[in-house]
Image: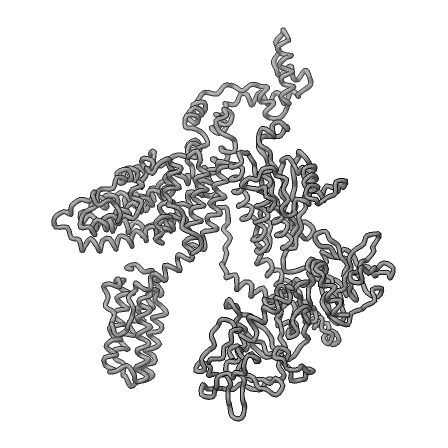
């Protein structure tokens, strides 16, 4: 705790306060109440100023003692004042002199607990904060891993490695040993060449981390040991040679084999060593933090100095204690940092990695030292250290093979190097290309120049060449061309001038692309990397503030109330009659601000669908692999925003749709080849706005829905009569029925006929709709239509007796005034309405709801035709009052599940209106309770 | 306290010694009831209540409490006291009810008239009476004797939770 960070100004203020306090305590008169009050305030101020928990506690407790003194409690005033004096000196020692808690004697009378208790609390908070950040980090990780798989972009790989590295650092700080270890080994694997199954490895790592973090957050079981995961990729527990961290040193250092311990040298001071171990841990933690700072702010001189100091101190003490291994390593790291500090070396890429590794290795050495000392021995030399020392030397020397493993390419690095490192081209290919580049260039042909400068199409040049060859006089190409009128003499002249210019050496990238040694995309990516961090930094980091979801909801509630209150005021008749132009203007202004606030409020809950799409990308990849298919997954409109609750609920349906598309939609490669399609299938997922709704569209180019198969299955299940041939969309909609599957084989992915039922249920729960278009052999498109927000709907307000109800406009088909001859009674109970030849069940809301005083004569009432899940029904109400936008409110826990109602809304007059649940009503009517209620009401 | 009937929710009845404190008293018919002041959120005048169909008769309906929709219970109906026309003094006491699963629900109860806030000390409290199986007294915490008055101290959590709410839900699902 020696270097607690207190801003300078504050620490000066603190020192001054303490000085004053020290004087005041000495001069204090136990009977002088104002003086004691000032003393009390002084201690409280100190408690507020300090950053250290221990000091804070001490100061608070001292303030408490002064209070007791004022009240005449707490025993002998002189003794109390003495204790206070000691407290002041303790605080000074702790905060101003930077002494550790162990060195300072806090007066026991104060009853301050040792800091050991305060630290875990702080750690837990840090850990919680760390964990809360991880889902986003892992998402980015996965996204970049997939990006890398697709484009081989070194930037993506760099991001992946950066994330791993940061994670490692933070995990180390938080004592998440296994996470740290996993990140470290993964880094090693990445550094030692790019494995064939690299994406699998990275995705595996991501999943492992997700599980580990979930476990830490208290959900889910602990993941398998990290080594098992990694070993399945490296083919054995032994890490690749040259890595800094062999597997055996991975576990807790204390568990290192005792047999390898060396005896303690004579005269070795174990107690000094204990201090050194504790101090070094602090130094290394600090170094890691500052290195992380440097990673983002390479110019931060303070951080640089702090890192240097940490290694320097360790080196010094280790030398004094005769710990050669630790001293040597710290020395080498210090050298590296010294050069960086002097600006001779950029602490980035390989240098940065090496510095981090040195820190990690030192920590390991120190832990194994601690472990060995506990057994009364010295630890055996660490096998990895010599290799690391070499690398540090190399990096410090500014180059060599070690530097080539850099990920963050230093600006100005050679293109070839970048390509080799990122695995886009082999070193041989680059070298060959470089040789070609060195070769003297031949004079360019006139024809080529003309074609290149787009004066002529290649065809005419070829024609002219033929002509030239056929002509015994062997005229010059230029002449032939001018003769044939293809070009003007001036153009030929210009081309000839160009031909005389000294040829430019072709660019390396061009050669590689021409020779087919690297793809143009890789070269472009490498060129971007070559331009250096400037390009990467162009991405502006949006500043965000994390807000408790509860608070956000409360804010939105309050805004909702404001909107209602505002409309109640501005529409009040009293105000309207008394309105002056000025008042109206003000009301208009109020209205505008309220709307703006409402819009802003709604946008707060909006999140882009990107994260969800990302998950789908991963899913497609995994499923395709499992099914042995090649599938390109394309997303669009990822920035489209949806209400957070919608985004959360849309995931499941999408998963089912994607599974279906991969499993049933896209054909195996050979079948596709036979059908004349490209071998790799294509699934597109797009989101966009259309007509006030959000559309999410999933298209595959597979075999399409098999109409005949669906029809046959429907007939088999008795859903259709054998003669019926409904239109396409009705046939396709059959697949949404529960238990409906045409799959011959139930795979572990799909085929049970549950998925599509889930799709429709979830989407309808979001008040959306799903639509299918499919063409046999061409593919299928699912379109999900979702409302922009869940909170607002269009509603038709109807009157029934004295009550008003709201019917969602979406489910209203039309409204008619029934004619007497169109209403039929069935069995004296149910009623039917004949509408253009169709017979539709008619039910009376007043009877369903047992609400009296409604119009009983159907010809004087209004029948509202509603539709739910394809079934139509007519609801008899007294009057249509109009249509309006309704903010949906929950009916509350107690009323939840009231059948026939889906929610409540605040009407413009401030009362509550009830929203009818059309589906529920239809079910209610069909369940026969209509008859019962009808009887009861009659 | 030995009056807890099996029908009450699992929560234990509170010993009389913990019941002292401030109580909001109100009238229902000729009886005086008391509510722990900490359970009361506010008192509002009677406003138009929207009737919710297919709910038990003691549920008067829902109201808009500053943008929140809350249910309103007619306490006369609930206690089986014959109902009467609302008067000027009829009002809604908004209470916070702790339901099963430790869920805090806001509800309104309609009472004839709000009287005053009384400080009732432990020694003024007698355990709830027992009238035999015919009268359900589980939601009475105790009887407070303040001056000439006898205050029936309600355990509002038990009045408005558990069985009753379940009944609402049951009616809804039937």
Please say which color scheme the image uses: one colour
Residue A496 seen in the figure: yes
**Residue A705 image offset from top left, x and y in percent:** 66, 38
Q: Residue at x 56, y 22 (%)?
A: A497
* In the image: residue A724, left or right of residue A611: right
Image position, residue B69 (x, y; %): 62, 69
Residue at 81% from the left image edge and 54% from the top image edge = A839
Is the residue A287 above or below the residue B150 in the image?
A: above
| Residue A797 percent location from the top left of the image | 74, 64
Residue A92: image quadrant is: bottom left
Residue that appears at 48% across and 86% down? B126
Q: From this viewpoint, which residue is outermost toward the top? A: A472
Residue A856, x across and y down, in percent: 81, 68
Q: Residue furthest front?
A: B133
In the picture, the quarter occupied by the C terminus of chain A is bottom right
Say whether residue A928 is left or right of residue B113. Answer: right
In the picture, residue A834 is in which quadrant? bottom right
- Of all residues, the one furthest to the right in this rendering is A821
Total numbered labels: 0
Above or below A529: residue B23: below
- The quadrant the N terminus of chain A occupies is bottom left
Q: Nearer the viewer, residue A316 or A937?
A: A937
Front position in the image: A47 or A934: A934
Q: Residue furthest bottom?
A: B148
Q: Is residue A349 visible?
A: no
């Amino acid at each position: 705790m020696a270097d607690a960070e207190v801003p300078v100004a504050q620490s000066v203020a603190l020192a001054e306060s303490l000085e004053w306090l020290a004087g005041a305590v000495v001069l204090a008169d136990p009977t002088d109440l104002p003086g004691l009050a000032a003393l009390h305030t002084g201690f409280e101020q100190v408690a507020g100023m300090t950053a250290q928990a221990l000091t804070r506690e001490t100061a608070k407790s001292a303030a408490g003692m002064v209070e007791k003194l004022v009240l005449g409690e707490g025993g002998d005033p002189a003794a109390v004042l003495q204790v206070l004096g000691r407290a002041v000196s303790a605080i000074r020692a702790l905060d101003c002199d930077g002494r550790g808690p162990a060195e300072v004697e806090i007066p026991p009378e104060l009853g301050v607990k040792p800091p050991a208790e305060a630290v875990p609390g702080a750690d837990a908070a840090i850990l919680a904060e760390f964990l809360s950040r991880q889902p986003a980090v892992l998402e980015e990780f996965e996204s970049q891993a997939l990006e890398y798989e697709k484009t081989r972009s070194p930037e993506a790989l760099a991001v992946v490695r950066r994330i791993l590295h940061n994670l490692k650092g933070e995990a180390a700080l938080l004592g998440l040993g296994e996470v740290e270890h996993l990140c470290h080994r993964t880094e090693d694997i990445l550094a030692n060449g790019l494995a064939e199954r690299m994406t699998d490895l990275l995705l595996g790592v991501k999943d492992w981390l997700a599980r580990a973090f979930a476990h830490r957050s208290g959900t889910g079981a602990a993941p398998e040991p990290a080594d098992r995961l990694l070993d399945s990729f490296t083919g054995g527990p032994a890490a690749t040679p040259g890595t800094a961290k062999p597997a055996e040193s991975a576990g807790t250092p204390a568990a290192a084999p005792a047999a390898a311990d060396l005896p303690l040298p004579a005269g070795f001071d174990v107690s000094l060593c204990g201090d050194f171990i504790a101090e070094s841990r602090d130094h290394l933690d600090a170094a890691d933090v500052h290195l992380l700072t440097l990673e983002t702010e390479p110019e931060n001189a303070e951080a640089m100095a702090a890192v240097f100091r940490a290694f320097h101190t360790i080196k010094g003490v280790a030398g004094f204690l005769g710990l050669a291994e630790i001293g040597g390593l710290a020395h080498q790291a210090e050298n590296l940092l010294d050069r960086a500090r002097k600006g001779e070396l950029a602490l980035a890429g390989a240098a940065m990695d090496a510095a981090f590794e040195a820190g990690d290795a030192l920590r390991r050495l120190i832990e194994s030292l601690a472990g060995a000392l506990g057994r009364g021995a010295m630890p055996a030399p660490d096998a990895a250290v010599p290799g690391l020392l070499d690398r540090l030397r190399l990096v410090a020397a500014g180059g060599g093979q070690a530097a080539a493993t850099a990920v963050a390419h230093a600006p100005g690095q050679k293109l070839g190097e970048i390509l080799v490192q990122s695995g886009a081209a082999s070193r041989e290919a680059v070298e060959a290309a470089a040789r070609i580049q060195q070769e003297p260039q031949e004079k360019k042909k006139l024809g080529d120049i003309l074609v290149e400068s787009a004066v002529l199409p290649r065809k005419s040049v070829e024609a002219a060449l033929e002509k030239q060859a056929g002509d015994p006089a062997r005229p010059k190409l230029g002449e032939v061309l001018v003769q044939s009128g293809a070009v003007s003499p001036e153009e030929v002249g210009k081309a000839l001038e160009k031909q005389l210019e000294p040829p430019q050496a072709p660019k390396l990238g061009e050669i590689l692309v021409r020779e087919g040694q690297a793809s143009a995309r890789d070269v472009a990516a490498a060129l971007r990397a070559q331009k250096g961090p400037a390009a990467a930094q162009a991405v502006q980091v949006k500043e965000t503030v994390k807000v408790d979801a509860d608070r956000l909801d409360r804010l939105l509630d309050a805004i909702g109330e404001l909107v209602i209150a505002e409309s109640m005021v501005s529409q009040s008749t009293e105000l309207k009659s008394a309105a002056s132009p000025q008042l109206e203007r003000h009301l208009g202004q109020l209205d505008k601000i309220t709307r703006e606030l409402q819009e802003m409020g709604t946008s707060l809950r909006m999140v882009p669908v990107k994260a969800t799409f990302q998950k789908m990308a991963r899913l497609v990849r995994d499923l395709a692999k499992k099914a042995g298919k090649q599938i390109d997954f394309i997303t669009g409109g990822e920035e489209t925003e949806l209400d957070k609750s919608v985004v959360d609920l849309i995931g499941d349906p999408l998963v089912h749709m994607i599974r279906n598309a991969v499993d049933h939609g896209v054909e195996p490669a050979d079948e596709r080849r036979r059908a004349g399609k490209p071998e790799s299938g294509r699934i597109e997922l797009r989101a966009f706005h259309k007509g006030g709704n959000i559309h999410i569209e999933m298209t595959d180019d597979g075999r399409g829905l098999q109409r005949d198969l669906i029809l046959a299955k429907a007939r088999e299940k008795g859903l259709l009569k054998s003669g019926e041939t409904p239109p396409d969309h009705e046939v396709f909609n059959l697949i949404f029925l529960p238990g409906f599957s045409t799959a011959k084989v139930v795979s572990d992915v799909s085929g049970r006929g549950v998925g599509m039922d889930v799709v429709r249920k979830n989407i309808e729960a979001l008040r959306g709709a799903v639509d299918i278009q499919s063409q046999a052999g061409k593919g299928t498109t699912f379109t999900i239509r979702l409302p922009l927000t869940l909170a607002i709907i269009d509603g038709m307000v109807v009157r029934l007796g004295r009550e008003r109800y709201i019917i969602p406009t979406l489910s209203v088909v039309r409204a008619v005034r029934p004619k007497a001859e169109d209403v039929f009674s069935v069995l004296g109970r149910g009623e039917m309405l004949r509408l253009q030849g169709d017979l539709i069940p008619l039910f009376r809301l007043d009877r369903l709801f047992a609400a009296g005083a409604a119009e009983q004569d159907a010809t004087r009432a209004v029948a509202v035709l509603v539709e739910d899940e394809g079934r139509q029904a007519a609801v008899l109400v007294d009057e249509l009052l109009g249509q309006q936008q309704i903010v949906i409110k929950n009916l509350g826990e107690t009323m939840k599940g009231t059948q026939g109602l889906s929610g409540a809304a605040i009407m413009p007059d401030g009362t509550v209106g009830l929203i009818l649940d059309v589906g529920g009503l239809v079910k209610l009517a069909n369940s026969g309770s209509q008859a019962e209620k009808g009887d009861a009401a009659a | 306290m030995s009056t807890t009937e099996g029908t009450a929710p699992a929560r234990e009845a509170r010993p009389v010694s913990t019941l002292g404190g401030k109580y909001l008293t109100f009238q229902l018919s000729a009886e005086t009831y008391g509510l722990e002041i900490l359970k009361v959120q506010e008192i509002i005048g009677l406003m138009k209540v929207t009737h919710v169909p297919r709910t038990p008769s003691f549920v008067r309906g829902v109201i808009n409490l500053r943008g929140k929709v809350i249910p309103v219970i007619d306490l006369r109906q609930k206690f089986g006291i014959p109902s009467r026309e609302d008067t000027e003094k009829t009002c809604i006491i908004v209470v916070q009810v702790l339901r099963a699963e430790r869920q805090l629900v806001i509800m309104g109860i309609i009472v004839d008239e709000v009287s005053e806030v009384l400080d009732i000390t432990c020694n003024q409290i007698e355990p709830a009476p027992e009238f035999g199986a015919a009268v359900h007294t589980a939601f009475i915490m105790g009887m407070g004797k303040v001056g000439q008055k006898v205050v029936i101290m309600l355990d509002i959590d038990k009045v408005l939770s558990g069985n009753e709410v379940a009944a609402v839900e049951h009616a809804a699902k039937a």
